[in-house]
Image (cartoon, helix red, strand yellow):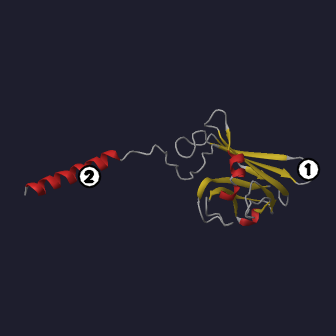
């Protein structure tokens, strides 16, 4: 009986020491590939064959949630006109301001811009750039307006690490904005 108690105590002591000896390796765990913080989105429409540039912006200094955006322009374009469309993204919560456009360009294989007009006849978007896997990106492209009318232009930046396949479905939104669109 004494032998069983000694054996039990030795096992308990050994297990206790094993747990006490386990230490954190000190390595920081890498966070998942998180969405970007984007506080400013600027759309630049350059009328084809001219140097006429129309710029429309969205600004939300504290990011999604919290306070309402401080700027949300209405997009106003000419009917039956082709434009080159470029987009700029900033994180103005940092000093100096972080140009997220460059980050999206560098990680283009994880990002896809989606431009969805409602009604669809207001505007047709054609991608002008592709990533290393030959999938569209949407940092630049062509936008052709239809007949005069009013609607919306949904601008989404899909974050698709490890899942990008050229469609909007996989991933999550870094940006999801509904601009009012007037073609007149």
Q: How many marks?
A: 2
Residue 97 can be seen in this image: yes
21 vs 168, nearest the viewer: 21
14 above or below 167? above
Q: Quadrant of residue 38?
A: top right
Helix, strand or loop status at disc 1 = loop
Foreground mark, 1 or 2? 2
| Residue at the front extreme of this rendering | 3
The CA distance from mark 1 to mark 2 is 78 Å
Give the position of the C terminus as an image quadrant.
bottom right
Q: Position of residue 44 (x, y in %)?
A: 78, 48
30 vs 4, nearest the viewer: 4
Give the position of the N terminus as an image quadrant.
bottom left
42 vs 16, nearest the viewer: 16
Task: Give neighbour class at mark 1: few <14, some 14-19, many 20+ (Cα, 10 Å).
Answer: few
The residue under the point 26% across, 52% down is 15
Task: Give neighbour class at mark 2: few <14, some 14-19, many 20+ (Cα, 10 Å).
Answer: few
Q: Is residue 142 left or right of residue 68?
A: right
Q: Position of residue 154 (x, y in %)?
A: 66, 57
The residue under the point 61% across, 48% down is 36
Q: What numbered label is drawn on residue 21?
A: none
39 vs 105, nearest the viewer: 105
Q: Position of residue 161 (x, y in %)?
A: 61, 58
Helix, strand or loop status at disc 2 = helix
91 above or below 154? above
Q: Which residue is mark 2?
A: 15
N-terminal-most mark, 1 or 2: 2
| Residue at the left extreme of this rendering | 1
Q: Position of residue 99 (x, y in %)?
A: 69, 42
Q: What numbered label is drawn on residue 50?
A: 1
The residue under the point 78% across, 51% down is 86
Q: Is residue 58 left or right of residue 149?
A: left
């Amino acid at each position: 009986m004494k032998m069983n108690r000694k054996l039990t105590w030795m096992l308990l002591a050994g297990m206790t020491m094993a747990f006490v000896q386990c230490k954190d390796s000190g390595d920081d765990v890498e966070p998942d590939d998180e969405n970007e913080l984007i506080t400013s989105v600027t759309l630049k429409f350059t009328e084809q064959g001219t140097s006429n540039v129309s710029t429309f912006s969205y600004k939300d200094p504290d990011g999604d949630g919290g306070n309402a955006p401080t700027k949300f322009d209405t997009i106003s374009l000419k009917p039956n006109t082709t434009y080159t469309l470029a987009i700029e993204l900033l994180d103005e919560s940092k000093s100096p301001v972080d140009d997220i456009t460059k980050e999206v360009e560098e990680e283009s294989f994880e990002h896809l811009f989606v431009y969805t007009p409602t009604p669809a006849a207001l505007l047709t978007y054609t991608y002008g750039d592709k990533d290393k896997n030959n999938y569209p990106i949407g940092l630049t492209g062509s936008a052709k307006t239809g007949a005069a009318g009013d609607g919306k232009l949904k601008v989404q930046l899909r974050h698709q690490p490890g899942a990008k396949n050229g469609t909007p479905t996989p991933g999550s939104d870094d940006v999801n904005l509904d601009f009012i669109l007037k073609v007149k």
